[in-house]
Image (spheres, coloured by chain):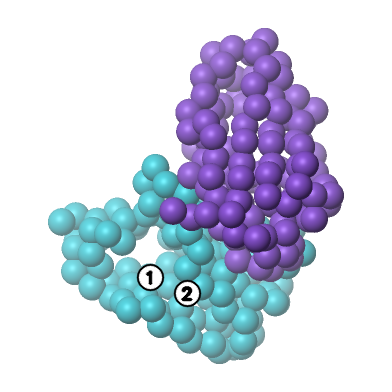
Chain colours: A purple, B cyan
Amino acid sequence: ETGVTQTPRHLVMGMTNKKSLKCEQHLGHNAMYWYKQSAKKPLELMFVYNFKEQTENNSVPSRFSPECPNSSHLFLHLHTLQPEDSALYLCASSQATGNQPQHFGDGTRLSIL
Amino acid sequence: GQQVMQIPQYQHVQEGEDFTTYCNSSTTLSNIQWYKQRPGGHPVFLIQLVKSGEVKKQKRLTFQFGEAKKNSSLHITATQTTDVGTYFCVRGAQKLVFGQGTRLTINP
């Protein structure tokens, strides 16, 4: 139990579908993150939120749309994804941004048909 | 942000053997963090090193931060099957930058 819960754990969707990934943290942290982990690449930071304000968008395509309604919840809305978007999507949180240790959720394994 | 280079990329050992992974940066690091990711799991924070020459131990794991704060290492003594996974050194700055990691597999 990491204190960071992600749902769903697995998701299979077609390229024309719209779906959302959810992340919730119970650690009282102020910063939340979305990462993408593919088989052949290092962990890629996608978005950073600090006190529910987006502070970083790491050149992520617009077919990924994050939402952070409060410091405990983070969503990643998906639409018209491509096969190369198939990956493990990890959510993390930390007390603050910068060099604070991050706590990760179990991730959502996303497969695009 | 600039990645840290980690070697080796893969390491296979017999259970009971020691294991070391090295992390190198061309620039001085303010701090370095280490994470472990088990197969099918998520990265888990192990430790953060901040001071030049710092050495920290966690049971069979020994973490070092170089004097120049440009390199770091993780040494595992007498590996066990539970040590299997990928170990990441992570550059801590305005944001964390993960490297490729070292994937450790163990023959029981």
**What label does residue B73 carry, if any?**
2
Evaluate whether residue A109 shows in this view: no
Q: Which residue is mark 1?
A: B20
Secondary structure of the residue carrying tag 2 is strand
Question: Of the residues under marks 1 and 2, which one precedes in the sequence?
Answer: 1
Kind of residue at badge 1: Thr
In this view, the residue in front, A77 or B22, is A77
Q: The C terminus of chain A appears in which quarter of the rendering?
A: top right
Q: At which x and y percent is residue B9?
A: 44, 55
Is disc 2 surrounded by few (<14), some (14 to 19) or many (20+) residues within 10 Å? some
Evaluate whether residue B78 shows in this view: yes
Give how far apart the Cα atoms at labels 1 and 2 are.
7 Å
Is disc 1 surrounded by few (<14), some (14 to 19) or many (20+) residues within 10 Å? some
Q: Residue at x 56, y 74 (%)?
A: B48
Left or right of A107? Residue A45 is right
Q: At which x and y percent is residue B37?
A: 44, 54
Q: Residue at x 42, y 47 (%)?
A: B41
Could you confirm whether marks 1 and 2 are on the same chain?
yes
Q: Residue at x 69, y 33 (%)?
A: A76
Left or right of A62? Residue B80 is left
In this view, the residue in front, B104 or B92, is B92
